[in-house]
Image (cartoon, grey):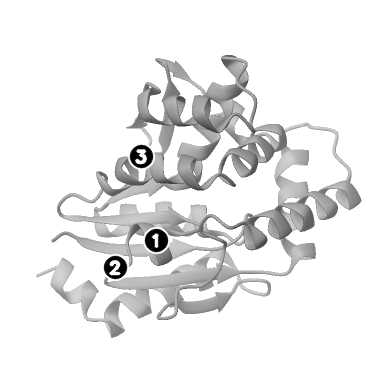
Amino acid sequence: MPIIITIDGPSGAGKGTISRMLAKKLGFHYLDSGALYRLLGLAAERHRVATDNTKALITLAEHMDIRFETTSDGDFKSLLEGEDVTKAMRTETTASLASQVASHLNVRAALLKRQQHFATDPGLIADGRDMGTVVFPDAALKIYLTASIEERAQRRYKELLEKGEDVSLPALVEQVRSRDERDMSRDASPLIPAADAVELDTSELSIQEVMDTVLNLTVVKGLFASIHQ
């Protein structure tokens, strides 16, 4: 079995950034499971499928044409039906669509095997909300990143301002709060830490401090040494 490290947590906790950094550092494959749900949300919007039409969403989930590619600078991009939709996937509208389609148990089941197929040698960093609890319950290391709602909204606010978007911080706080409530209370794979996950609050930590802590966890688990034998 390839080595699998899962990094779960709510939006804005830093799991995407840390997962990508860790995948590059270890030379592992990277699964952004949230991207799958965002892609499904985008596909639903483009094909005019309502987010409460479970049957149609399952059909889309099983057959949508998606690819993840590494760019020349080592970053990752997402393609839907051959089109680079990386930028479109980062909007708040797409994030909301993703949360809505992810609330359906049968839709999540339809995407489960697609996610598990990413687990190939030498290893996988899986970033999401139920990677350690549902998709890869036997992962070698499970990490759960979190941060306060206010801090996560502030991070998103800064990111959107840098992109030149006109946004309201109070509105973002409410969006984050609403998404948390929806993700944590849903019947299908609610957002909770795995029982054996290491929980880390990133509210007061820099990206490098979080990365150093995560790398230390791989050493403690004996993974870093085995990876670099």
What residue is shown with label 1? 134
Disc 1 marks a residue whose amino acid type is Val
Percent across and percent down for residue 37 are: 51, 39
Disc 2 marks a residue whose amino acid type is Ala
Q: Is residue 100 above or below residue 84?
A: below
One can see residue 197 in this view: yes
Kindly identify which numbered label has been placed on residue 82: none
The N terminus lies in which quarter of the figure?
Answer: bottom left
Q: Relative to 221, is 190 on the left or the right?
A: right
SS assignment at label 1? helix
Q: Give the mark, 2 or 1, whose residue is nearer the N terminus.
A: 1
What residue is shown with label 2? 139
- Mark 3 touching mark 2, by CB under 8 A? no
Q: Quadrant of residue 167?
A: top right
Disc 3 marks a residue whose amino acid type is Gly
Q: Is 71 or 111 nearer to us in this picture? A: 111
Q: Give the mark, 3 or 1, whose residue is nearer the N terminus.
A: 3
Tell which tag, 3 or 1, sits nearer the viewer.
1
SS assignment at label 2? loop
One can see residue 12 in this view: no
At horizontal 65% and vertical 35% (from top left) the residue drawn is 97
At horizontal 31% and vertical 58% (from top left) the residue drawn is 25
